[in-house]
Image: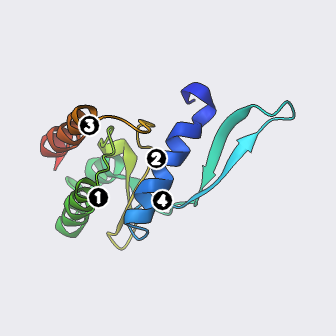
Amino acid sequence: EYPGGGEAEFKALSSLYSVDSVHVAKPIKLNVDPEGKIVGFDMERLNGKTAREYAQAHGSIPAQSAEQVKETVRRFHESGLAHGDLNPNNVFVSPSGDIKIIDPVGYGDIPWEEFQKYADLDMQTLSSWL
């Protein structure tokens, strides 16, 4: 569940997708209940396992997958965006080793200092599991 129904997370995912549509899950639509309240969102269906599941089954994720994650995060940061929750449960690894990133923090329009905290968090989190 997302605070506020997921609208901020949907917007964040849409922004990240605009930077890298190959390695970010495609956001599809916001889900609205009959009263007009946002109750979640849909994204493309992913084939594969989370990076955590993949590593548990195979010892680690493929080197190609790790490089794709690092390169995608570099593109986010160069574009002034950050994920904010880049843990192995938010990266899917396909059977071919390609990755898709999901579930960013819905941080919205934030000052540079706040963005920098999220970008630093991305890098700290990555270094702990890649």
Residue at the (37%, 43%) spot, across then down: 89
Position in image of residue 129 (x %, y %): 18, 44
Residue to which mark 1 is pinned? 79
Check the image and name the residue furthest to the top: 3
Mark 3 vs 1, N-terminal side: 1
Residue to which mark 4 is pinned? 25
Q: Quadrant of residue 103?
A: top left
Mark-to-mark CA distance, 3 and 4: 20 Å
Q: Nearer the viewer, mark 1 or mark 4?
A: 1
Mark 2 vs 4, N-terminal side: 2
Q: Are marks 2 and 3 in contact (CB under 8 Å)?
A: no
Mark linked to residue 118:
3
Residue at the (64%, 38%) spot, across then down: 40
Type of amino acid under label 3? Tyr
Residue at the (21%, 64%) spot, across then down: 71
Mark-to-mark CA distance, 3 and 1: 13 Å
